[in-house]
Image: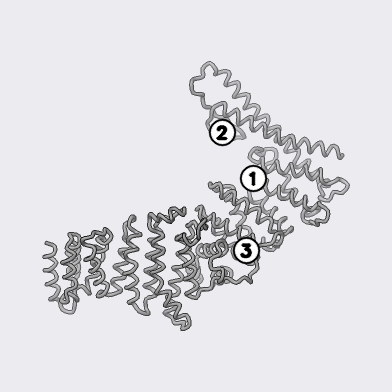
Amino acid sequence: MALEELKVIIERCRAVENDSFSSDDYELLVSAGRVCIEQGDGARLEDIVKDEKNQGIFRCMGWNLLGPLVQVLLRKEEESLPHCLAILTHILEVCSPKELLIGLLEQVEDAHPEAIAETILLLLQPLQKVLLKLGTKKASSVGMALATLLNQVARLPVPYTREQEEDDTFGLCRCCAALLVFVQPFVDEVSRGLETKAAQQDELKTELLKFCMKCLKEPLLNAQLKEGTDSSESSPLRKFAIEILGVLCRIGESIPELLFHHLLKRKEPGFLEEDARYPVESLACLAYLLFVHHMATDMFPAVFSPVFVLRFNMEYINTLLTRKEESRLQKGLDLYEKTLTRVEDDSLPVTLLDLKTFFSVPQNLVKVMTQCPVQHLRTKGLSVFQLSIDKFDLEAKHKFFRCMLKTSHHAGVEGYVIKNIKNQIDFGLKPGNGNPWFVGSHLLPLLRLVLCLPQGPETDLLQNMDRIMESLNLLRYLLLRDKEYENETGIWTELYKIEDGYMKPLRVALNMSRAHYQMELKSIRDSQRLKAREAKASPPVCTVTVDSQQLPNMTPEMQLQVLQSGLHTFDLIESILVRIEEIVEERS
């Protein structure tokens, strides 16, 4: 029935002069053709499409059959497959390249979520063939095609493990490999024309640059690119990354210039377009591939100093550390670690801390250390944090510690910084180690930041335990290590201020906190005795308020453990405080 209807439509269209077909002609032809394809009349339809008498009709309207053809080809029905492929091939030969391009990209955009990869793999070769027919004015069309394809590729889940890459369940790895084949003739064209510097070549080069930048951002920035025990070439996404860097080099892009782009660019008219062409996340991935995985190292001169490399990488490290995704945080930490490793210890000058990124990177690193839900990233963050401290010279360490004590707002981080301060003082007090920034007049402002209670006597001692314990340990160390008659650190001159401003308020805070906890402890025990006879099989649930905060619902036994643990912490703090008071009394 549909076939007969199609024949009637064909006969009517043959009578139309100058191929001036109406919109009704288009709709009727496409409708009848779709039904023929879906009903398995592909062989008869192929004969009609290839009939010499019908060439004018299908030259104008044949591209409208792309939709039903693609759907049948995706189903891979053996009976219809060869005929539909033949029809598609013929349409690609006779129809307008511009109309075919629009039709093919529509099929890519409309792909079913579960058939994205198969649709892309099916249509890449036809798309390439159509684009190559456009001649020298194809740059914008190539760009449109690449953008559409990558938008769909970005919807595919990125494999997390090597096994998932090998399985390639969602087809991302196959799509990446096929995209490299797709762009190959365009890359070759740009590569051949680099010497001519024709405008068309510049436009095509720009579109290929955008393609590489998008690939670096997605999927490569989300991919796990670590080398396995076998050859790294066995990883499809690692191979894709290497090939993308190869494309950049072949189209005449300089890897150093790309990486230095954010340092060299000027805010002139058109800079927003430049920022879009060189996305910072894409360049961050490029830096990661170069400095962590040593890809394309032969394209990066060895003349740049480690400090200069650190300086331009800080922008990329900061970008990665501001993200929440595990893969991007991991790349940021790895890039920071590898970049710092090349820098000599105690060499970074204090002037670097005036740069915005040298302030923001530590702040974001602290967030990773304290807020990231992934344990191994928190651990790695702490390791890199210490590595960064080791690279600063003495004056820079001094300024860095002051900054962290003022801005971190986290007792654990502050405690870690105070431990580093103690290590620097200990090193400086050893014979032959001149360290003017951690003795005398330079040290005292730092000690005033360390030896203080954030909220005075009302400070939450448990919440600030790490900071308090480290500050007391530092004070005890100074009083024992620095003899009063030498007073190299200035601690003995400052002692009366420390006693009034730190030790006495801490003693008050201890007494208040201990009294409160003991009262709560007594209250729970009294309540248990009163309700012992009424106790049921399941223990009762109660709430306790400590330091104006209600503890989570828990059994009385659990509440007792919490309170007893708090009292034990107060005892630890007091034991060090008593020892400090004894040392002061002995030296008086």
Q: Is 555 on the left or on the right of 502, as rendered?
A: left
Read off the residue under disc 1.
Answer: 412
SS under mark 1: helix
The residue lying furthest to the front in this view is 230
| Kind of residue indicated by mark 3 | Leu
As drawn, the label of residue 551 is 2
Residue 103 quadrant: bottom left
Q: Is 147 on the left or on the right of 16, as rendered?
A: right
Say if residue 5 shows up in the picture.
yes
Q: Is 177 on the left or on the right of 428, as rendered?
A: left
Q: Quadrant of the C terminus?
A: top right
The residue lying furthest to the top in this view is 533
Residue toward you, 100 or 290 = 290
**Measured from the top left, where is residue 496 in percent x and y?**
81, 43
Read off the residue under disc 3.
Answer: 310
Between circles 2 and 3, the one closer to the viewer is: 3
| Kind of residue indicated by mark 1 | Gly
Residue toward you, 552 or 268 = 552
**Measured from the top left, where is residue 409 in percent x and y?**
63, 47
Disc 2/disc 1 C-alpha distance (Å): 21 Å
Residue 300 to residue 388: above or below: below
The residue lying furthest to the right in this view is 485
**Measured from the top left, where is residue 477 in percent x and y?**
78, 44
Disc 3/disc 1 C-alpha distance (Å): 27 Å
SS under mark 3: helix
Say whether marks 3 and 1 touch (CB < 8 Å).
no
Residue toward you, 19 or 543 = 19
First-in-chain label (2 vs 1): 1
Q: Quadrant of the N terminus?
A: bottom left
Residue 188 quadrant: bottom left
Residue 20 to residue 152: above or below: below
